[in-house]
Amino acid sequence: MMSFVNVSLKETVWNQYCFKLKSFYGMFRSIIILQVIAIGFTSLAGVASTGSGSMTISFNVQYYSADAVIAFTMIGLFINGIQMTTKPFREDDFVFVTNRLSQNLSNMAFLLTVSVATGITALLSRNVIEMIRYFLPEHSYMQDMDGPNTWYMVVGGGIATILYIAACSALGYLVGSLVQLYKGLVIIIPAVVIGYSVILGTQEGYIMGKIWAFYFSEHHLGLFAVKLICTIAICYGAAILLLNQKEVRNV
Amino acid sequence: MISCKHVTKTYRGTTALNRLSCNIHENTITGLIGRNAAGKTTLLKILTGMIKESSGEVEVFSKHPFNNLFVSANSILVDDQMSFANSISLYELLQQAGRFYKNWDMDLALRLFDYFSFQPNAIHEGLSKGRKSTFNMIIGLASRCPLTIFDEPTTGMDAVVRNDFYRALLKDYIAHPRTIIISSHHLDEMEHLLEHVLVIKKGKELLHIPMEDLKEYAIGLEGKTAVLKEWLGDQPVLTKRTASDYAYIAVKNDFDTEQLEQVKQQGVKVSPVSANDVCMYLTKGQKGGIDDVFRQR
C-alpha cells in the first residue's frame, strides 16, 4: 500500500520558490537586458542637459544618473508581475504539489527576489555609466554632483530603490490578478489610470497629486519604508484573495 | 477513498456534471468510460482540486480537494494539458518532480526515460503529441501518488507504446498498489487492467460495476425477428440491427440458463457481448445512428 505523505505550507512554498528560481530564470535575463539598454541610452545621451555660452565661451552640462535604469527596471518588474498571473505561469505549478495560497506566496517570494537582485544591479549601473562616459571621446570634465557619499545615503537610497521596484512588481501582480478575474479590465485599467492622470494630474491637491506626494515626497526613510512595505503587502494580500478561487486547466 | 455526492458542475450555462454520485475504493484500478463531453475530464479535475464543483459534496481522502495541500501532495492528474515549464529540460523536470513528490522513484523515472529514448536536454514543448503523453505517463508512474489519475493517457501514442504503458502500469501497480483511475476510449485494450468500470453519460453515473460483471452484463441474440420479438416482449434492448427478417439484438442478461436453452432451441444464436460493446451501446445517443444522418438526402 502506498503511504500518504504530509506536506506543510512552508515546505511547499520553499519547493516552489526553488523551482521558480530555476524555471523563471528568463525573467532575470529580460530585466538585465532592459538595464543594458537603459545604460546605453544614458551613457550616450544623458538624462538631462543644459548649456549656455557667449561670444568667447560656451559650455554644455549633461547630467548622468542611474534614474533611467531604475525606471526601466520598474517598468520591467511591473510587466513581470502581470506575467506571473497569466494562465501558463499559473498552470506550471499545478503539475506538481500546490494550492493557490502556496502558489501566490512563492510567486511573491520570487518577485521580491528579482526586485532585490535587479535593484542592486540598477544601483551599480551608475558606476558603469560613469566608466563609459570616462572613455567616450567628448568627455572633458566630470564632477560627481549629488551622488551618494555617505553610508546612510548609499544604504538608504538602495533600500528606497529596491522598495520602489518591489512595489511596481506587486502592483503588476495585483493588476494581473484583477485581469485574470475579468478580462475586460485589460482595457479599463489603463484607460482609467491614464484618463484620470490626464484630467486630475495637472490640478494640485487632487487624488493623483496626493498619491504622488504620499509615495515620492517622503523624506523620512523609516516612514517611507513602512508606506512602501504596507503597499506591497496590500497588493499581494488582495491578489491572494482574488486568485484563491481561480480554477486551472479549465479549457 | 473517493466519494462524490450529487456533484454538479456548470460552465457558463452548460452542465458538465449533473448530480453525479460515486464511491471509489482504495487500491483499485477503475476505468472511467464515457463518450466525448460526458464529463469525465471535469470529474477528474474536481477530484484533483484543479476546478471546483458548483454544488454537491466531494471528498478525496476524507478531505475537500479544492485548495487542499494534502490532496495535492497525494494525487496526480496526468493528461495532455499538463503545462511544464519550457525553460528547463526534460531531465530537470524529472528532478523537480522529485522535489515535490515525496514518494518519487527517480530510478524508475530514469529507466523509463531511457527505455523510451528521451533526450535529457529536450524541451517538453518541442515533443510531439505522443511523446508528450509518454513523458507525462512517466511522471505519473514515478510520482507514486496514492491517487494516480490518467485522463486519456494514450492520446497520440502508437500501439507499441500504448501496450508498453499498460504493462508498465500493471507491473508498477502490483509492486506498489495504489488507487488508479484511467479514463480512456480504448476499453478493449485495457480490459485486463481494470477491476472496476464507472460508466458516465451526460454528466451522470450510469453504471459502476466490477469488470467481470460488465463482461457478462449483456448477451447478443441472433435469429428470426418474429421469434426474438415474441420472446423478448417489450424488454428494453441495448442495440438492434436488422436484415430482412433476421435480427441481432443485445439485451441486458437477466436470463437463467434454462431460459437461454429454450431460446437456443428456437434457432436463436446466443453470444456474449464484449465490455467495450456494452459501454458503447449504453452510452450512445438517442438520435439513432450515423446512418440516419445520410438517409433521406
Image (cartoon, rainbow, N blue to C red):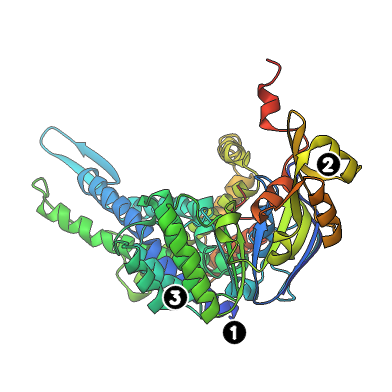
Q: Residue at x 66, y 22 (%)?
A: B294
Residue A127 location, x and y as percent? 23, 62
Quadrant where the C terminus of chain B is found in the figure: top right
Query: Is residue A180 placed above or below B49 in the rendered structure?
Result: above
Q: Amino acid at mark 3?
A: Gly
Asked if labels 1 and 3 share a chain, the reply is: no
Label 2 sits on a secondary structure element that is helix
| Displayed quadrant of residue B132 | bottom left
The residue pinned by badge 2 equals B228
Q: Residue at x 58, y 55 (%)?
A: B188
Residue A115 location, x and y as percent? 42, 63
Chain of residue at mark 3: B
Asked if labels 3 and 2 share a chain, the reply is: yes
Quadrant where the N terminus of chain B is found in the figure: bottom right
Q: Are marks 3 and 2 in contact (CB under 8 Å)?
A: no
Residue A124 location, x and y as percent? 28, 64
The residue pinned by badge 1 equals A3
The residue pinned by badge 3 equals B98
